[in-house]
Amino acid sequence: MSIEPVGLRESKKRETRQLISDHATRLFIEQGFEPTTIAEIAAAARVAKKTVTNYFPRKEDLALDHHEEFVAGLAGIVAGRAAGESALAALRGAFLSAVERRDPVAGFAPLPFARMIADSPTLLARLRDLHDQRDAALAEVLAEATGAGPDDITPRAVAAQLGGAHRVLFQRIQELTLAGRDAAEVAAVVAEEAPRVFDLLEPSLAEYAVA
Amino acid sequence: MSIEPVGLRESKKRETRQLISDHATRLFIEQGFEPTTIAEIAAAARVAKKTVTNYFPRKEDLALDHHEEFVAGLAGIVAGRAAGESALAALRGAFLSAVERRDPVAGFAPLPFARMIADSPTLLARLRDLHDQRDAALAEVLAEATGAGPDDITPRAVAAQLGGAHRVLFQRIQELTLAGRDAAEVAAVVAEEAPRVFDLLEPSLAEYAVA
DNA sequence: CGTAAAGTTGCAACGAGTGTAAGATTGCTC
DNA sequence: GAGCAATCTTACACTCGTTGCAACTTTACG
């Protein structure tokens, strides 16, 4: 992409950011998200409170980093689908392989992490936000792929359907994790359920956005 | 349902609640949601700040009241569908008639109110929350209607599809309102688009949850 | 009436988030 | 390598939403 002029300043920034993030994650897991204060995180990382909020403007960002990757996921899969493959087929395949590799993007997480999220209204809200942004990004790619006009509602409706499937399965994985099943069990259950969810869309979307 | 022992206490409570809500709505519309402080609302309604937060534990509740009705909407429509009618058909019909009557539940609102929401991350998050709760309620009714087991993911997937359609159309109505179109124009545009959105689901869901 | 229950109020506190200005560090140039 | 400018970190102060608590007022009811 671009050359990386890794100056001292840049590398120190990365370190500081990582330092804060690590302490935050640890404290969140130990005590929960809401009970942990930003002041506490700052003290643990031995930086000023303001430094924490400089790097992470919102507290949620400390717990749910890498959101860009999550938001761009579905859109990227559709953009990179094979010739002759529909958006639905690409997303189905990507989800199933994400399950196989226990990908956090699909909803896999260690139990304490899942608990941290489930116990925090703030994080749940943020997650909903990310799901929505992901749908919007997907809608844009679909509009492009099908040559739909900027005012055509179809790509948005399809994105809602496809994003909805992923959302339901994401929640299902979280739910099973919270119920105490280990990752292998969760993967097995979801590997059986996911095809049913995608099959539901097959009659409607099999021919949509075929590359 | 139940008799109404309208004591003085009860009626004063209702008045106070309404008084606060009215001032809040007025101020939100005049100044926006975020810039308006609870202290300001309390002063306008001539009550203590604590009284405001007693009636409305969260600031969002002051702007988005009647959420119960919204959340229960889709589930209620499916529960009350005619014999021989599918969940999809019932929801399609209900949405179109909601558009005809410019129902706020479908997303219709005066421009200033729509602006208030669009300008506030807090309110947008709350709205996403309500949409989610609505999907969950719908899923429950669908599970009941189809006799699905408590662990069957199908009703949830279907609820996501149906709820997603309503969500997209809700956002579309907001978007058109924000663009300055009056309610009649918005209704005309959406009356044309909605059938396309529901038609998309027809191949998948025409036979699902037929009463 | 008088007492118990419920509602309102003022006060204090906590925590997230923001603005600002001072101090420290780094990058760059002469 | 000294100095200057840009950038990062810090301390401080402040706003606002939210909660807890105790005192006070009003209503309900025996």
Image (cartoon, coloured by chain):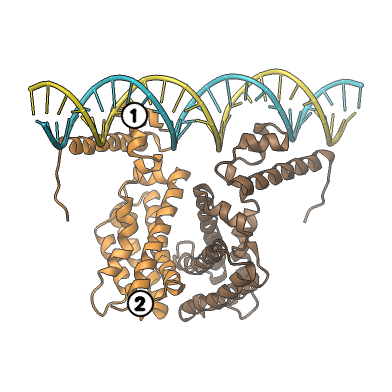
Chain colours: A orange, B brown, C cyan, D yellow
Q: Secondary structure at mark 2?
A: helix
* Crowdedness near tag 1: few (<14), some (14–19) or many (≥20) residues, C-alpha within 10 Å: some
Give the image location of residue B114, x and y in percent.
Answer: 58, 57
Which residue does the image show at 53% across and 68% down from the upper left?
B169
Identify the residue at horizontal 70%, vertical 41% (top origin).
B20
Q: Is residue B113 visible?
A: yes
List x then y, in percent, for residue A83. 23, 78
Tag 1 secondary structure: helix
Q: Position of residue A104 (x, y in %)?
A: 30, 53
Viewer-nearest residue: B16 or B30? B30
Q: Is residue B52 visible?
A: no
Tag 2 subunit: A
Q: Which residue is mark 1?
A: A42
Of mark 1 and mark 2, the one earlier in the sequence is 1
Q: Chain of mark 1?
A: A
Q: Which mark is residue B207?
A: none
The C terminus of chain B lies in which quarter of the figure?
A: bottom right
Q: Quickly name the residue at label 2.
A: A146
The residue lying toward the viewer, choosing from B85 and D25, is D25
Q: Is residue A73 above or below residue B198?
A: above
Q: Residues within 10 Å of mark 2 (few under 14, many from 20)?
A: some
Residue at 60 percent across and 72 percent down: it is B185
Residue found at x 77% / y 56%: B1
Give the distance between the C-alpha atoms of the residues marked 1 and 2, in whole angstroms. 49 Å
